Image (cartoon, coloured by chain):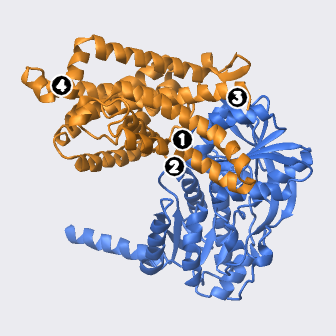
Chain colours: A orange, B blue
C-alpha cells in the first residue's frame, strides 16, 4: 500500500465527511432545538440535487445551480415547517418519525411524477472537470472543490452560531427553549429559521453531490442513514460534534472500504476474504457508533440539552 | 336524456367486455430506482399492441399491468391477483431475478405461460426449467460471457473485475471468468449493494494499472460508477468493459461521461435489419427516447406472442398447441438470429458495443464486434424438460 494511495483515500474520506457534515448540521440543529426527528432531511438533499440539475441544464451556470438548490431547498424547508411540521413539534418522537417517513414517500413520488423514474443528467462544471496532481497522486478537482466548500460552510456556521446574536439565540434555544421564549424571543420564528437553514444546507449537499452520484428518486435515503450515524456519534444537537463525527465517519468508512478487503486477504483465504471484507468494511461505522454509545452514550460532544432530554 | 346516456354507457362497457377476449398480465418494476427498466419493458409491449390495432395474433387483448416494486412478497401478491382474480392466460415482463425466482414456479405450476422479457436466473434455465416458461432475453451469465470472450480475443493480460456484493454480482463475475482465457483476473472487488461512492476502490484500481477493467453495476449504481470513474480521469488510461451498466436507461444521465465504454449484450439500437430499424423509429417517435435493450427484449416477447396466438387461431386454451407455436419462435426478431433452446432460453449471437455519438449526435451504443455466434447458456444440460 503506497503512501500516495493512502493519501488519496484520506482525501476521499475527507470529501465524504464534509458532505455528511452539511447534512448532519441541519439535522442535528433541528433535533437539538426543536427535539424534532426529521427523517425527510434526505428528501431535502434530493430536492437540492434536482433543483440544481434542472437549473444547471437550463442556464449552464453552476453558480446559478448552487443558488437554485440552496434557495429551493431552503424555501421548501420553510414551507414544510410552517404548514406541515409545526403541529408535530409537541408530539412524541414516534409520531414525528411516522409523519416524516410519509414525507419521504411523498417527495420520492413527487419527483418521479415531475422528472420521471430514471436518473437525470448532471455533469461537473467545466472549470472543475480536470484532475489535480499533488504529491504524486491525481485527484478529481471537483472533489477538492467539495472539500473546500464544505470547510468554508463549516467556518461560516461556526461564526454564525458563536459570534452573532441569532447564533446566541440558537444556542440558548437548544439548551433552554422555554427560558428563551419567556424572555420575549419569538421561538416559533427561530425554529422556522433553523429549519430552513438546515434545509438549505441539505440542498447544498445535494447539488454538490449531484455530479458525483446518480440524481434519482430515493437518492436521499442511503445518505440519511449515514447522517443519522454521524449525529449520534457527534452528540445530538451539537454542531461541533456533527463536524468531527462527520469527518470521522467519512474517513473510517472510506479507509475501511479501501483497506479492509486487502487486510482480510492476508488473514483468510481468498473466497472467505472476498465475502467478509466488504461486509465488515460496511459495518465499521456502525461498530464505531456502538462503541461510542457504550462508552459515551451522549455522543462525543454532548450538549447539555442532550443530557436533560 | 339520462336514460340514453346510461344505455350508451352500458353498451360501451358491454362492447369493451366482449372485445377484450384475451387478458395478458404484465409484471415489472414500475416504481423505485429500477423503474426505468420495467417502464421500457411495458412501453415496448404496448407499442407492438398499438401497432397491431390493440391486438396480438389478431385477437383483441387487454393488458393488466402490475408493479412488483422489486419486492418478492409484493410480486407474489400481484401474481396471485393476476391468476385468481383477473384469470389472465399469459403473463409477461418480470424485471429482476429475485422476483423471477419468487413467481416462476407459482405461474408455471398453474399452467399459465410466462414469457420472461428480462431476468434469466440460472435455476430456471437448468433444473427448475418449465415448459410454460419462455425467455426472450438471455440467461443472466450470457452478457458476462460475451465480455469475457471479448477480453480473451483482445489479449488483455491483467483484468480487474468489480461488482456489487450480491448474487447477480457474483454471477456476472463468474460468467466473465468462464470465457476469459489467456490472462488473469488480478483482483475481484465486491462493493456493498447500497454503496454509492466508489472513490476508495477507484484509487486502488488506478494504482494497479490493469489492461482493462470489467464491471457490472446495473441502474443507478452504474450512473454513480461511470461518473466517478470519468471524474477520476481514468477514462483515458483504462479500458472499461461492462455488462448491464451502460445501457439505454442510464446513458441519458451519463452522456459524454460514458464515451468509449464497452458493453456486452445481444442487441443494439444500431442493428441494420429492417425489423429493428422500424422498431427503433417507432419507439423514438412515440416515447421520444432511444429504446433500451429492456424495450427490445419486451418487443420481441410481444412479437413472439403475436406470432404464436396467430398460429393457434386465438385458441390459447389449447396449451399443447400454444406451446408448440411459442417454441417455433416464428417471428422476425429485431436482434436477427433467434431460436429457442431445449430449456426455452434463446440461442442467439452475443455482441460487444461501445458508447459513441449516433447520427443525431446523441450518446448511444454502437456495435463493435460479435464475439459469440449462436451462443447457448451453460445450464441447458441440467434441464429435463417435461412435456405439457
How far apart, in angstroms, are the residues tagged by discs 3 and 1?
Answer: 31 Å
Question: Chain letter of disc 1?
Answer: A
How far apart, in angstroms, are the residues tagged by discs 4 and 3?
Answer: 48 Å
How far apart, in angstroms, are the residues tagged by discs 1 and 2?
Answer: 8 Å
Q: Are the residues tagged 3 and 2 within 8 Å (C-beta)?
A: no
Pointer 4 residue:
A189
Pointer 1 residue:
A119
Pointer 3 residue:
A5
Say which quarter of the image contains residue B136.
bottom right
Up the image or down, A302 lies above or below A270; here it is above
N-terminal-most mark, 1 or 4: 1
Q: x and y percent of residue B241 in the render?
A: 77, 44
At 74% from the left edge and 72% from the top edge, which residue is drawn? B329
Q: x and y percent of residue B55 in the render?
A: 57, 69
Q: Are the residues tagged 1 and 2 within 8 Å (C-beta)?
A: yes
Describe the element under mark 4 as helix, strand or loop: helix
Amino acid at each position: 500500500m503506497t503512501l500516495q494511495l493512502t493519501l488519496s483515500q484520506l482525501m476521499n474520506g475527507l470529501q465524504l465527511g464534509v458532505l455528511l457534515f452539511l447534512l448532519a448540521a441541519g439535522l442535528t440543529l433541528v433535533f437539538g432545538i426543536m427535539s424534532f426527528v426529521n427523517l425527510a432531511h434526505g428528501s431535502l438533499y434530493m430536492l437540492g440535487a434536482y433543483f440544481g440539475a434542472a437549473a444547471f441544464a437550463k442556464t449552464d451556470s453552476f453558480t446559478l445551480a448552487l443558488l437554485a438548490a440552496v434557495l429551493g431547498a431552503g424555501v421548501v424547508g420553510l414551507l414544510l415547517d410552517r404548514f406541515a411540521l409545526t403541529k408535530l413539534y409537541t408530539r412524541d418522537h414516534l409520531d414525528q418519525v411516522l409523519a416524516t417517513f410519509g414525507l419521504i414517500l411523498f417527495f420520492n413520488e413527487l419527483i418521479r411524477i415531475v422528472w420521471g423514474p430514471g436518473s437525470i443528467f448532471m455533469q461537473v462544471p467545466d472549470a472543475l472537470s480536470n484532475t489535480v496532481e499533488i504529491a504524486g497522486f491525481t485527484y478529481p478537482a471537483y472533489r477538492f472543490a467539495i472539500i473546500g466548500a464544505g470547510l468554508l460552510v463549516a467556518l461560516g456556521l461556526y461564526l454564525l452560531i458563536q459570534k452573532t446574536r441569532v447564533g446566541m439565540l440558537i444556542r440558548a434555544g437548544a439548551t433552554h427553549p422555554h427560558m428563551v421564549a419567556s424572555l420575549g424571543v419569538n421561538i416559533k420564528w427561530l425554529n422556522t429559521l433553523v429549519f430552513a437553514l438546515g434545509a438549505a444546507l441539505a440542498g447544498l449537499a445535494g447539488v454538490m453531490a449531484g455530479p458525483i452520484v446518480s440524481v434519482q428518486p430515493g437518492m436521499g435515503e442511503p445518505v440519511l442513514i449515514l447522517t443519522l450515524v454521524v449525529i449520534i456519534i457527534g452528540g445530538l444537537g451539537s454542531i461541533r460534534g456533527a463536524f468531527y463525527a462527520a469527518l470521522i465517519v467519512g474517513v473510517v468508512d472510506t479507509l475501511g472500504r479501501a483497506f479492509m478487503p486487502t487486510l482480510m486477504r492476508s488473514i483468510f483465504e481468498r473466497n472467505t476474504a472476498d465475502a467478509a471484507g466488504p461486509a465488515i468494511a460496511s459495518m465499521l461505522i456502525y461498530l464505531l457508533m456502538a462503541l461510542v454509545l457504550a462508552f459515551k452514550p451522549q455522543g462525543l460532544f454532548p450538549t447539555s440539552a442532550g443530557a436533560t432530554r | 336524456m339520462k336514460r340514453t346516456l346510461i344505455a350508451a354507457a352500458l353498451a360501451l362497457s358491454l362492447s369493451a367486455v366482449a372485445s377484450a377476449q384475451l387478458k395478458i398480465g404484465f409484471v415489472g418494476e414500475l416504481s423505485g430506482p429500477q423503474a426505468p427498466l420495467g417502464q421500457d419493458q411495458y412501453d415496448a409491449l404496448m407499442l407492438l399492441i398499438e401497432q397491431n390495432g390493440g391486438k396480438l395474433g389478431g385477437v383483441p387483448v387487454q393488458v393488466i399491468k402490475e408493479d412488483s416494486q422489486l419486492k418478492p412478497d409484493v410480486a407474489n401478491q400481484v401474481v396471485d391477483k393476476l391468476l385468481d382474480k383477473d384469470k389472465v392466460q399469459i403473463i409477461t415482463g418480470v424485471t429482476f431475478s429475485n422476483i423471477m425466482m419468487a413467481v416462476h414456479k407459482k405461474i408455471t405450476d398453474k399452467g399459465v405461460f410466462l414469457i420472461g422479457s428480462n431476468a434469466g436466473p440460472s435455476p430456471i434455465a437448468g433444473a427448475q426449467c418449465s415448459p410454460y416458461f419462455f425467455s426472450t432475453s438471455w440467461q443472466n451469465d450470457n452478457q458476462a460471457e460475451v465480455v469475457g470472450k471479448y477480453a480473451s480475443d483482445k489479449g488483455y493480460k491483467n483484468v480487474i473485475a468489480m461488482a456489487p456484493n450480491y448474487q447477480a454480482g457474483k454471477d456476472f463475475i463468474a460468467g466473465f471468468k468462464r470465457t476469459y482465457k489467456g490472462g488473469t483476473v488480478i483482483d475481484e472487488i465486491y462493493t456493498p449493494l447500497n454503496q454509492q461512492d466508489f472513490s476508495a476502490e477507484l484509487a486502488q484500481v488506478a494504482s494497479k494499472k490493469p489492461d482493462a477493467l470489467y464491471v457490472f453495476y446495473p441502474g443507478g449504481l452504474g450512473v454513480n460508477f461511470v461518473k466517478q470513474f470519468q471524474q477520476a480521469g481514468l477514462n483515458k488510461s483504462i479500458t472499461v468493459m461492462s455488462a448491464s451498466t451502460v445501457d439505454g436507461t442510464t446513458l441519458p444521465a451519463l452522456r459524454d461521461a460514458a464515451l468509449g465504454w464497452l458493453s456486452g449484450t445481444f442487441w443494439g439500437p444500431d442493428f441494420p435489419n429492417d425489423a429493428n430499424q422500424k422498431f427503433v423509429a417507432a419507439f423514438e417517435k412515440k416515447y421520444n427516447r432511444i429504446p433500451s435493450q429492456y424495450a427490445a427484449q419486451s418487443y420481441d416477447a410481444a412479437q413472439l406472442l403475436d406470432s404464436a396466438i396467430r398460429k393457434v387461431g386465438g385458441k390459447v386454451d389449447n396449451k399443447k398447441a400454444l406451446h408448440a407455436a411459442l417454441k417455433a419462435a416464428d417471428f422476425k426478431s429485431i436482434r436477427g438470429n433467434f431460436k429457442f433452446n431445449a430449456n426455452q432460453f434463446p440461442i442467439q449471437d452475443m455482441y460487444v458495443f461501445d458508447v459513441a455519438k449516433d447520427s443525431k449526435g446523441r450518446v448511444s451504443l454502437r456495435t463493435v464486434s460479435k464475439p459469440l455466434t449462436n451462443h447457448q447458456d451453460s445450464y441447458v444440460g441440467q434441464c429435463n424438460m417435461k412435456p405439457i
